[in-house]
Image: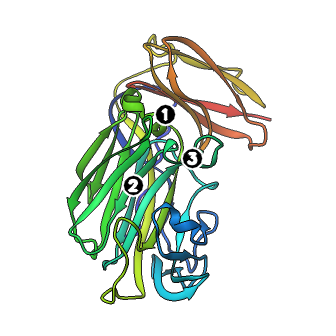
Amino acid sequence: MKSFVFILFLFVFFCFQAKAQFTQLVWSDEFDGTSVNKSNWVFETGNNNGWGNNELEYYTSRPDNATVRDGNLMIIAKKENYGGKSYTSARMKTQGLHDFTYGKIEARIKAPVGQGIWPAFWMLGKSVNQSGVGWPKCGEIDILEHINSVSVVNGTIHWDNNGHASYGKTTTCDVTKYHVYGIEWDTKAIKWFVDGKSYGEASIANNINSTNEFHAPFFILLNLAVGGVWPGNPTATTAFPDTLFVDYVRVYGLTTGTSSIEGENTKQGVSQNFPNPFYPKTTISFNVPTKSFVSLKVFNANGMEVSTLASGELTAGNHERQWDASGLPSGIYYYRLQAGDLMETKKLLVQR
């Protein structure tokens, strides 16, 4: 269950996108240790006025509410007086540690049920704490939400379209058994999956309906809420303690099947960087064939994103971005250019 082969596809030549495939593992937590990995997760604590949902729990960072055991993260909701509230639980996030733009994001989860119980596996835009942004302008992607004892799970996005806008789908699922919940997210759409079967899709192509939030970095959250506007409050029938089990969380980056592979003198989507090798700065120039959403990111040799140089709509024509590698170790890096359906990846050599 926990073993898998990690094959990192590194493209030296230009590749043109035929069919997107999320096969490059760029980050994961397998929860194989004995405690929560603090290089992956931080805790949000307190009640924060019910987190905007009139929730009843007090989130803590105690092992009583979040621990790792037998290859699972266990988030445990308890009925107890703490911090002026009658329930405790945990809310964990990768904010400030790991954020992602596009990819396949999935987790294998077994969830609790009961009146007033609300487990969630979701994402928020990195800009949430920026002045003038907040929610919903930062964007929200709910990969899994479940309330009470209903027979369906929910996948939803929230964003700002001159006011709060949302779109979502549901599918039948017994959450008390392990399932893999995930999304596939690229420049065109966000698709929801349970056990590899798609059940919903939201278009974000060309920022349709002001969905520009979904072309920017997001971080991951896991939490188990108690009560709130949506599920209602617990009753005497709700069993405590109740536990959310998470076997793993994995993020896969975008690689491509290729319809053609050409050398560096390709006449389509020309991009180049100079100087190369370099230190500390290089200039990346590229051509956008038609007006489109463009993403230009730099990754290290382990597939981890180290810089975003462009993320937004650009006009057709030639563009330049400068990358400063100061503070990064010498070695091989890669930049990935996405412009509409075109994807190109090229090697960078940082040499002090």
Q: Quadrant of residue 255?
A: top left
- List the residue tagged with mark 2: 142
Q: How is the image coloured?
A: rainbow
**Amino acid identity at mark 2:** Asp
Q: Quadrant of the C terminus?
A: top right
In the displayed structure, would residue 299 be above or below residue 40? above
Q: SS of the residue at dot 3?
A: helix
Q: Residue at x 58, y 66 (%)?
A: 48
Relative depth, front residue between 121 and 297: 121
Q: Quadrant of residue 45?
A: bottom right
- Marking on residue 134: 3
Left or right, 180 with respect to 5, comes to left
Badge nearest the viewer, 2 or 3: 3
Left or right, 73 with respect to 319, comes to left
CA–CA distance between discs 2 and 3?
Answer: 17 Å
- List the residue tagged with mark 1: 11
Does the image show residue 13? no
Question: x, y percentage for residue 286?
Answer: 56, 17
Question: x, y percentage for residue 66?
Answer: 53, 78
**Amino acid identity at mark 1:** Phe
Q: Residues within 10 Å of mark 3 (few under 14, many from 20)?
A: some
In the displayed structure, would residue 314 be above or below residue 104? above
Question: x, y percentage for residue 92?
Answer: 54, 66
Q: Residues within 10 Å of mark 1 (few under 14, many from 20)?
A: some
Q: Residue at x 51, y 68 (%)?
A: 50
Q: Residue at x 60, y 72 (%)?
A: 46
